[in-house]
Amino acid sequence: MLYKKYLVIIPGIILAFVLYTLSQGFNNIIGIELLGYSKSPISTAMIAILLGMIFGNIFKVRNSIQKGLDFTREYILKLGIICLGIQLKPFEFLDFGKIAIPLIIICIVSVLIVIKLLIKKLRIPTRMAYLISIGSTVCGTTAIMATAPVIKASKTEISYAIANITLFGILSMLLYPYFANLYFDGESLLVGLFLGTSIHETSQVAAAGLIYEQQFNSPETLNIATVTKLIRNTFLIIMIPLFAFLYNRGQSIKKDYSIIDIFPFFVLGFVGMIIFRNIGDQTFIFQNKDEWIEIIDIIKMLSKISLTMAMAAIGLSTNLTDIKSMGLKPFVVGFIAMATVGIVCVLTIEIYLNLII
């Protein structure tokens, strides 16, 4: 029965919501009650991830719950990102995108060059290095899973690459908001571009942006980081054929992918929400303005809840034992890829973007 198919995801979704509620409670208790701030200086998203990792590694997550967590990580996350579009207007999306695209291209090319050198230096399997490379530069696990078939990667290589992206993505997600605020002196545009370009997964960028927004009261940074990351995701359309060509040069190969399969369609939902906001602003500018503002606030809250639930699901699904057992060399490549993206982002922002901003 169709309804049974959807019933199995409910326990995992409920668990993610419970952790969201707990993280919100801990946030208020620690930040307001204990530390005495009027607004907690601790991010709800960060607490949700850490709570998820603690619970997920102390208690074994059952398969019946994991299905709901997977749904939360994939679909409720996308719902949260789509709803983020309510905070933007079309001209802002275009302005941010115009600045972000050159930065994204420079980062991708830089990592490709470095990874190519590391393949020979560290004797890392080419397929694994390519998976780590595309995961680091485009859109994390999604990019890895989409690229794996076209370069004939094994399950072990896929697992290693995903473990890399998970480990270094979580580290950068937790550390980069504070580093970026310090280094870029709280400049929201520069911080947003850095977070959106340097962190691997869409969910991790959303979490880092949310952490920054909650810590430093900067909704604009979250918007810029999200727009940058969504533009970066569309580069998957270019990168998969490129990697297929680089790996299979001189061989007669069958095309194992399609544009429809790899295109991140939720980006269109994000753009649609921006247009919806613009139409609403124009329609209710003189009448029913309060009701329209209330609708905007509800959608913003839905976005926050959805993203925090997704962060909790990511934490619950992160198996630290599996990551520990993967071996050292691939993590050296992953660390260098992460460091390369971060350094190139900083240098590019300093040298290039400051000339045009």
Image: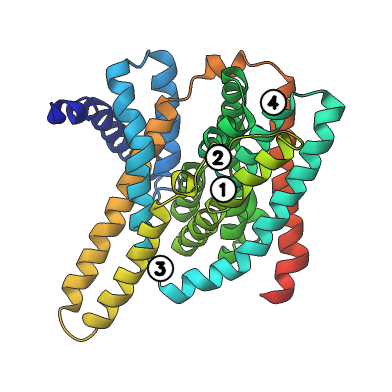
Query: In the figure, 157 relative to 85: above or below?
Result: above
Q: Secondary structure under badge 1?
A: helix
1 or 3: mark nearer the eye: 1
- Which label's residue is closer to the chain start, 4 or 1? 1
Using the image, tell me which numbered label, if any, was put on residue 236: 1
Using the image, tell me which numbered label, if any, was put on residue 88: 3
Residue type at numbered disc 4: Phe
- Distance from Cα at disc 1 to Cα at disc 2: 7 Å
- Which label's residue is closer to the chain start, 3 or 4? 3
Observer-nearest residue: 39 or 35? 39
Using the image, tell me which numbered label, if any, was put on residue 95: none
Q: Position of residue 217 (x, y in %)?
A: 45, 59
- Distance from Cα at disc 3 to Cα at disc 4: 37 Å
- Disc 3 residue crowd, few under 14, some 14–19, many 20+, Cα 10 Å: many
- Which label's residue is closer to the chain start, 1 or 3? 3
The answer to whether marks 1 and 3 mark residues whose Cβ atoms lie closer than 8 Å is no
Using the image, tell me which numbered label, if any, was put on residue 143: 2
Using the image, tell me which numbered label, if any, was put on residue 331: 4
- Disc 2 residue crowd, few under 14, some 14–19, many 20+, Cα 10 Å: many
The answer to whether marks 1 and 2 mark residues whose Cβ atoms lie closer than 8 Å is yes
Q: Position of residue 129 (x, y in %)?
A: 71, 31
- Distance from Cα at disc 4 to Cα at disc 1: 23 Å
- Disc 1 residue crowd, few under 14, some 14–19, many 20+, Cα 10 Å: many
- Disc 4 residue crowd, few under 14, some 14–19, many 20+, Cα 10 Å: many
Residue type at numbered disc 1: Leu
